[in-house]
Amino acid sequence: MNRIVIFTLAATAVLLSGCSWVKLDKTARNVAVVKPRYVKGCEYLGMVSGKVFTGAAGVQRSRRKVSEEIQTIARNNAASMGGDSVVPAGRVAEGRQKFKVYRCGR
């Protein structure tokens, strides 16, 4: 295989595994990802979901990075609903995850 092609594929793999394309909104900085026990007595506001790119051409992004980005999306969406806490409502599957949104007065 041509050295340029190999280098390009290797560089793409490194970039895809470490890049973060989702940014936390200023309004979402106070939204926490918490366990269910921390939202007892809080007001339930609804559900949000996040979906991110997990890889292409056989190059998969880091599970940790995918999870972090999905949580960032959930926090951004929760802030727009007036929430201050999100609780995962299932596991990450195919770059998707759902969250329950709460207002706890934090």
Image (tube, grey):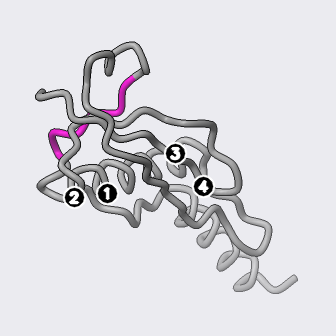
Label 4 amino acid? Arg
* Mark nearer the viewer, 3 or 1: 1
- The answer to the question of whether label 3 and label 4 lie on touching residues, with beta carbons closer than 8 A, is no
Q: Could you tell me how far apart the alpha carbons at marks 2 and 4 are, in whole angstroms?
A: 19 Å
Earlier in the chain: of badge 1 and badge 4, it is 1
Q: Could you tell me how far apart the alpha carbons at marks 3 and 2 are, in whole angstroms?
A: 20 Å
* Magenta segment: 29-34
Q: Quadrant of residue 14?
A: bottom right
Q: Which mark is residue 67?
A: 3
Label 3 amino acid? Ser
Q: Which mark is residue 77?
A: 1
Residue where numbered disc 2 is placed: 80
* Mark nearer the viewer, 3 or 2: 2
- The answer to the question of whether label 2 and label 4 lie on touching residues, with beta carbons closer than 8 A, is no
Q: Could you tell me how far apart the alpha carbons at marks 1 and 4 are, in whole angstroms?
A: 14 Å
Q: Position of residue 53 (x, y in %)?
A: 58, 67
Earlier in the chain: of badge 3 and badge 1, it is 3
Q: Is residue 4 above or below residue 56?
A: below
Label 1 amino acid? Asn
Q: Nearer the viewer, residue 11 or 71?
A: 71
Quadrant occupied by the N terminus: bottom right
What SS does tag 1 mark? helix
Tell me: 21 left or right of 14: left
Q: Position of residue 18 (x, y in %)?
A: 49, 56
Q: Kindly identify the residue that appears in the image at 60 percent across and 49 percent down.
A: 62
Q: Nearer the viewer, residue 38 or 19?
A: 38
What SS does tag 3 mark? helix
- The answer to the question of whether label 2 and label 1 lie on touching residues, with beta carbons closer than 8 A, is yes
Residue where numbered disc 4 is placed: 96
Q: Nearer the viewer, residue 93 or 90?
A: 90
All told, the count of numbered labels is: 4
Q: Position of residue 26 (x, y in %)?
A: 12, 56
